Amino acid sequence: MNFERHILCIGAGYVGGPTMAVIANKCPQYKVTVVDINPDRIARWNSDELPIYEPGLEEIVKARRGKNLFFSTDVEKGIQECEIIFVSVNTPTKNFGAGAGMAADLQYWDKTARQIRECARSDKIIVEKSTLPVKTAQAMKRILTCEDNGIRFDVLSNPEFLAEGTAIRDLENPDRVLIGSSQTPNGLRARDVLVEIYANWVPRDRIITSNIWSSELSKLVANAFLAQRISSINSISALCEKADADIQEVARAVGTDSRVGSCFLNASVGFGGSCFKKDILNLVYLCRYYDLKEVADYWEGVIRINDYQKERFILKMLDALFNTLADKKVCLFGFAFKANTGDTRESPAIFVARRLLEERARVVITDPKALQNAMIDMEGESGDISYVEDPYAACEGCSAIAVMTEWQTYAGLDYERIYRSMVKPAFIFDGRNILDHQRLFEVGFNVFPVGKPGLTHF
Ligand code: NAD
Ligand code: UGA
C-alpha cells in the first residue's frame, strides 16, 4: 500500500505507544512506526500483553498493528524511511553531576539527536514530544546541523498533555494540541504539516500554535499549575483536620466559583506519577539558572507540601495505632500512582510502604494492575512484604488498611466481611477519600480520612 506519510516515533513508552496508536487509528492513510532501544518493550508491543495498561489501548493496537502501525527495534531503518520523527524518549531528573536531583537528564535526548543526524538521508521534521527544558529545540537543531550534509531539519515543539488512565480519551479528544515552531518560512511550513496531521481528528480551533520557547515552557507550567492545585488543597486538608472542617465541603465551596473551577481539588495522600515532581524540579532549576530565586522558591513549595502530606499520612497512622507499628500487618489498597493505570512511578504508595517497613510493620500490597511494578519497586527493601491479588485475602489478619489508589473497586467491597477477618481494633486510613466513612465507622472500623476529623470508637 502507498501511504501518504511515513511517521516515526522514537521511544515506545507511556507517551509514544498510545500517541502513535491513536494517530494510526485516526489516519489509516499514514504509516506509523514506533521504535525503541528496549527489545523487551518492543516484543511486548508486538504481543497480546502490551507493556502498559491503558483503557481502550489494546483494542486500537490490535486493530492497527501490522496494517499501518508497526513496532520495531530498528531505529536506523525507521529514521531513513520517515519524513516526520516524533521523539518521546524519557527525560528523567538527573541524578549525577551538576543539577543532580533537579535538572532534566538529557542524555537519551542527546543520543537520539545524534542518531537522527547520522542515519538521515533526506529532510526531516523533528517533533519534540518529550517534556524538555526551554531552549532544548535550539540544542537539538545545533546537534542536527553541525555537519553540513545537505539535509534540512526543522524542529517543532509539540508537548503531550495526556494523563495516564485516560490517555486514549485525552488523545482522541484533547482540550488543545500545542505546536511551537520557529517563525521562519521553513519553521512555519513544518508547523503546517503537523497541524494537518492533527486536523484529521482535532477541530482546528483546538490546535494552538506559538513560538517554540513558549511551547516548551507551557508544558512545564501546565504541570506545575496542576500540581500546585493539589498541594494547595492538601495544605488546607491539614488545617481541616485540626479545625473540624471537611476538605470535600471546602473544595466544593471554593471550586464552584467558576473562576477557580472544580478540577484537581481532590485532597489525597499526595500526588505521584513520573512527571509532576520532575517537571516542577526542572522549572525550579531553570528559575535558579536565570537567578530568579523567589520564583524558584515559590514553585519548590509545591513539592515541599507534597512531601509533607505523605509524611503526615504515615505519622497519623503511627499515632492512631498507639505509636507502634512493629509487627502489625498493614494492607495497602492500591500501589499505582492513580487509578486505571499499572504505572507506579513516584507513587505515594512507594513512600508509604518504605516508611511502614522502617517502622517494622508487615506490609501487604494489593492492586488490580500494578502488582508486578510494585514488586520491582520494592525489590531489595528489607522487611516483611507480601503481594496479594485478592483484596479480601490481603486484609486477613491486618490491623489497618491504607487506601493508596482511588480504584473504584475498593469503594464496593464487603467491609463487614473484611472487618471480621482483621485484628481488632481495626483501622482504615483513606488516603483518597473514596470510601463511605460513616458506614465503615458503623461496621466497627476506626476511620481516618484525609482532611476530615477521624471517626474513632475510643
Ligand atoms: P517511558 O520511560 O515510558 O518511555 C520512554 C522510552 O524511550 C523507553 O521505552 C526507552 O527505552 C526509550 N528510549 C530511550 N532512549 C532511546 C533511544 N536513544 N532510542 C530509542 N528509544 C529510546 O517515558 P514516558 O512516560 O513515555 O515519557 C516520555 C516523555 O514524555 C517524558 O519526557 C515525559 O516527561 C513526557 N510525558 C509523559 C507523560 C506520561 O503520562 N507518562 C505525559 C506527557 C508527557
Ligand atoms: C499529569 C497531567 O495531568 C497531564 O496533563 C500531563 O500530560 C502528565 O502529568 C505528564 O506530563 O506526565 P498524570 O500524572 O498521568 O498526568 O495524572 P494526573 O491525573 O495528573 O494525576 C497525577 C497525580 O495527582 C496522581 O497521583 C493523582 O492521584 C493525583 N491527584 C490528581 C490528586 O491527588 N488530586 C487530584 O485532584 C488530582
Image: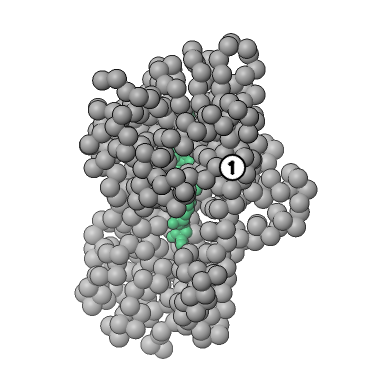
Residue in the image at 69% along x and 60% along y: 298
- 130 above or below 146? below
Between 110 and 178, the one lying in front of the other is 178
Q: Position of residue 333 (x, y in %)?
A: 34, 63
Amino acid of disc 1: Ser
Q: Position of residue 102 (x, y in %)?
A: 64, 46
Residue in the image at 58% along x and 26% along y: 186
Residue in the image at 23% along x and 42% along y: 59
Q: Quadrant of residue 407?
A: bottom left
Left or right for 336, reference 131: left
Most extreme residue toward the top is 149
Residue in the image at 32% along x and 34% along y: 27
Most extreme residue toward the right is 291
Q: Position of residue 221 (x, y in %)?
A: 59, 52
Residue denoted by label 1? 210
Number of callouts: 1
- 128 above or below 330? above
Badge 1: few (under 14), some or many (20 or more) residues near its Cα, within 10 Å? some
State whether residue 360 appears in this view.
no
Between 374 and 180, the one lying in front of the other is 180
Where, quadrant-wise, is the C terminus in this rendering?
bottom left
State whether residue 449 appears in this view.
yes
Left or right for 18, reference 230: left
Q: Position of residue 364 (x, y in %)?
A: 34, 60
Most extreme residue toward the bottom is 458
Colour theme? one colour
- 91 above or below 81? below
